[in-house]
Structure formats: structure tokens, C-alpha cells
Image: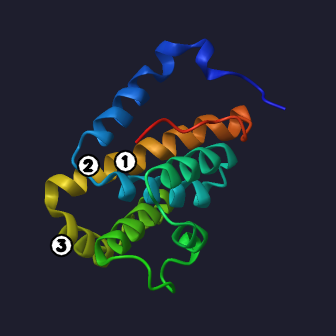
Amino acid sequence: MPRFNVNKRPDAVKPLFALSEYVRKSGLEPGLIELVQMRVSQLNGCAYCLDMHSQDARAAGETEQRLYLLQAWREAPFYSPRERAALAWCEAVTRLDPIHGVPDEVYEEALAEFGEEQLIDLNMAVIAINSWNRIAIPSRAEPGHYKPSKH
């Protein structure tokens, strides 16, 4: 059962909507953003966000196979080098090592694929979905009611 509805405090989430809109307009590929949102939500165990972003990813043309295997992306041959760099980055940023933060090799790989400006945008995408997860999980947002918008 849901605990609270953050929409009762719209000003509280207004900056997150603005950040999500920034990410959407950043030039990062929509499919890549959806994969990152899915993977971060898997790591955080956010059912609401997984439901939402799996529907959005499908609506944007993502395949079932790639969505099903996302949790095992390192072993699956279906992801591009750019997607792999993004997934490694989102995992490292979401799990931040308490001593070393994001490993240098993950940074170097992501920088090579994205360049500095797009890496900043990718990092903002990771920050945005982690923030949304941290709203949906404690509020116990209920999955199953989301309907994707047109892509």
C-alpha cells in the first residue's frame, strides 16, 4: 500500500522534472536513456520505475530480448560498446565505492565513448533516475498503473 503521494508537494519534485527534461533534450539517445533508467532501477529494486521505464523502452522500440537480459548485460552480446560504457557508468555511479568512488577504468571507457559533455549528461541521467527511485521506493509507489506516452 502506498505511504505518501509526492504529487501533493509539486514544488518538491519540480527540479527533478526539470532535470529529467534536461536529460531528455541533452542529445543522448532516447533508447540509451531508457536502458540506463532500467538498469539503475534494477540495482535499486524500484518496481514502480521498472514498470514505467520498461513500458517506455518498449514504446520507443526496445526489444524484449534486450530488456530481459539487461541485468546480465556484460554476458549478453546485444549491447553496443557505447551502451556498455553507459551501463558500467550507471552501475558505478549508483553503487559508488566508499573508498574509490567510480573506478578510473570505468571513467576512461565512458569518456572515450561519450566525451566530456555527453558524459556530464549521462551522469545527470543517472542522478535523475536515482532520485526518482529514492522517491518511489520509500513512498511505495505502486506499479501497474503507468501508461507510456507517445515516442
Locate residue 48: give its quadrant.
top right
**How far separated are the C-alphas under marks 3 and 1?**
18 Å
The local crowd at label 1, few if under 14, some if 14 to 19, many if 20 or more residues have their Cα within 10 Å, is many
Colour scheme in the image? rainbow
Q: Is residue 81 above or below residue 83?
A: below
The one of 139 and 61 positioned closer to us in this rendering: 61
Q: Amino acid at mark 1?
A: Ala
Q: Amino acid at mark 3?
A: Ala
Q: Is residue 60 above or below residue 39?
A: above
| Residue 44: x %, y % from top left | 61, 54
For the residue labelled by badge 3, is the local secondary structure a helix, a strand or a loop? helix
| Residue 77: x %, y % from top left | 44, 85
Q: Which residue is mark 1?
A: 125
What is the number of the mark on residue 121? 2
Q: Answer with mark 3 or mark 1, whichever residue precedes in sequence.
A: 3
Q: Residue furthest right?
A: 1
**How far separated are the C-alphas under marks 2 and 3?**
14 Å
The one of 116 and 52 positioned closer to us in this rendering: 52
Direction from residue 85 to residue 140 in the image, left or right? right
Name which residue lies at 43% across and 20% down: 14
The local crowd at label 3, few if under 14, some if 14 to 19, many if 20 or more residues have their Cα within 10 Å, is few
For the residue labelled by badge 2, is the local secondary structure a helix, a strand or a loop? helix
Is the residue under label 1 in contact with that under label 2 (CB below 8 Å)?
A: yes
**How far separated are the C-alphas under marks 2 and 1?**
6 Å
Locate residue 119: give its quadrant.
bottom left
Q: Answer with mark 2 or mark 3, whichever residue precedes in sequence.
A: 3
Direction from residue 145 to residue 73 in the image, left or right? left
Q: Amino acid at mark 2?
A: Asp
Q: Which residue is mark 3?
A: 112
